[in-house]
Image (cartoon, helix red, strand yellow):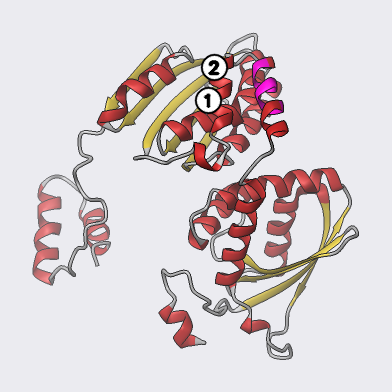
Amino acid sequence: RDFINTASEGKSSAGYLDAPKLWFVHHSIVDPAKFQNRMGEFVGIAASSENGDDLKTKFAASFGVPLGTYACASLFTEGADAACMWSSGEDVSIEDFQKYVDSFTTSACKNTVYAVDTGMSCNVMGLSEDLFLTEQIAWAKAAVATPTEEALAKKKAHLIECGLPEAQAAISVATDLPGGFKETTPSSCFYTHVIKPDGNVDEALKWFAEYTKAAKNSKGHSLVSHTYNPETREIIAIDIISGPNAMDNHIGNCFPAYAKMIGSGVEMKECVAIVPADEVEWWTNSLKVWGASRFIVKTDHVNDVSLNATIATPTEEALAKKKAHLIECGLPEAQAAISVATDL
């Protein structure tokens, strides 16, 4: 098992579990509708994932479960019961894990957690998280792959009803089809809204949360990082979106909640996007319609620099020289030492 795990690092393989702790969870589903909604959110995240590591990262960010804690088997019945096997690091207590799984399922389930005695149990360490993740992604992609014509027509009608122009509704809905979506170079978008003095804060934040969920479930989104600053009543967002199709998909998924958020007394203040040179005009036309008072779309001026260049292990002499140069430039010695250490 150790050999397979070592060989499988960074690859999509059948590496066995190497986490030291296992958990068995019984889910008693008390609110089927809420459970289905939560599973729908998960399906969206899994379907947008390229591999197991991508899914685990998105799962951790979306549901408050730390990286390194994930399921490795799931069992569903025809009734109101389900069960899962999870693995985690040694430092995760049963109280911690209970908190994580309750956060994931919300109030849709009553969760009973059991710590598994791996010494007394048989074959549990033969479970494969890699295969489980691969199967989850394939299952989720199949579930969302081809919506029916009726579902697309219903979604388009709802978008128009919410106030989206018919032409944009048609474009956005088309990206839900397998042949209607293609990723291009990622663009970085920073944008803020403010809740006006007469705005309804509770309503605005409720719809902001729904907007965020919809963004996380949209295609081609490698980062969706949103927050609210109560001191300034600002809604702050940073998204990394892989091309025009991904933005159109975002609009199709997010506009209903966005319209409700704006209707709660919210207005856009700024929108700054850094995009590929050949997409500046497209992004400018797409983003300017949202009415930001500060609006900037510029091309990435360093996009010719490789972010994944292979760097050889630096020598002690090179590290010492770099540290001395950092100090000479005004960086405190303690921080210089910490920064140089990350080159190793």
Vertical side of 131 occupied by 154: above or below: above
Q: Which residue: 43% across, 37% down?
A: 241
Could you say whether the residue bearing mark 2 is in a helix, strand or loop? helix
Residue at (67% x, 76% y) in the render: 22
What amino acid is found at the position of numbered circle 2 in the picture? Ala
In the rendered image, residue 157 lying in the magenta stretch gets the answer yes
- Of residue 43 and residue 120, the one placed in the foreground of this image is 43
- The answer to whether residue 136 is visible is yes
SS assignment at label 1: helix
Residue bearing mark 2: 167
Query: Closest to the observer: 282 or 193?
Result: 282
337 left or right of 267 in image = left
Query: Dividing the picture into quarters, in which one does residue 41 lie?
Result: top right
Q: Where's residue 20, x and y in %? A: 59, 79
Residue drawn where x is 52% and y is 78% of the image: 15
Amino acid carrying label 1: it is Ile
Of residue 108 and residue 48, the one placed in the foreground of this image is 48
In the image, residue 67 lies in the stretch drawn in magenta: no
Quadrant where the C terminus is found in the figure: bottom left
Please report contact status of discs 1 and 2: CB closer than 8 Å, yes or no: yes
> Which residue in the protein does label 1 denote?
171
Magenta-highlighted stretch: main secondary structure? helix
Residue stretch in magenta: 154-160
- The location of residue 289, given as percent across then percent down, is 46, 13
Q: Residues within 10 Å of mark 2 (few under 14, many from 20)?
A: few
Q: Position of residue 70 (x, y in %)?
A: 62, 65
Location of residue 218 (image quadrant): top right
